[in-house]
Amino acid sequence: MPRRGLTLAGGPEAEARLKASRKQYEHFPIGLAESLRMALPPWLSDPEALDYWKTSAWRNDSHL
């Protein structure tokens, strides 16, 4: 897949900033999931997994 001009930060400082950001909102989906007795998906998906729209019978690869 071609790059889209976005570079993600890495390293301990980026991990700490992400963790601090998640602390601000992650209790909301966790509480909702517990109330509805639903499992939440992982924060990061499997890099080998295809998105649902890419697995459809109506798939069109002309734009990829």
Image (cartoon, rainbow, N blue to C red):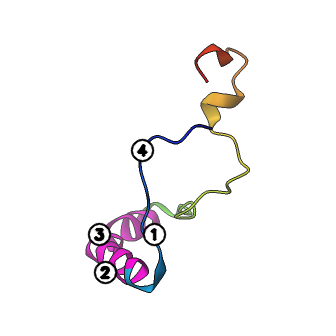
Label 3 secondary element: helix
Relative to 7, is 13 above or below?
below
Indicate which disc, 4 or 3, sits on the residue closer to the N terminus.
4
- Separation (CA) of disc 1 from disc 3: 15 Å
- Separation (CA) of disc 3 from disc 2: 10 Å
Relative to 56, is 14 above or below?
below
Q: Which residue is mark 2?
A: 20
Indicate which disc, 1 or 3, sits on the residue closer to the N terminus.
3
Label 4 secondary element: loop
* Residue drawn at x 42%, y 68% as measured from the top left: 9
Please give left or right for residue 3 compared with residue 52 in the image.
left
Label 1 close to label 3 by CB (< 8 Å): no
Classify mark 2: residues with Cα within 10 Å, few (<14), some (14-19) or many (20+). Answer: few
- Separation (CA) of disc 2 from disc 4: 25 Å
Q: Which residue is mark 3?
A: 25
**Image spot of residue 43 (x, y percent):** 52, 64
Kind of residue at disc 3: Tyr
User: In the image, which is nearer the foreground, mark 1 or mark 3?
Assistant: 3
**Image spot of residue 55 (x, y percent):** 71, 29
Q: Which residue is mark 4?
A: 5
* Residue drawn at x 31%, y 78% as measured from the top left: 23
Residue 4 magenta-highlighted = no
Q: Which residue is mark 1?
A: 34
Q: Nearer the viewer, residue 32 or 19?
A: 19
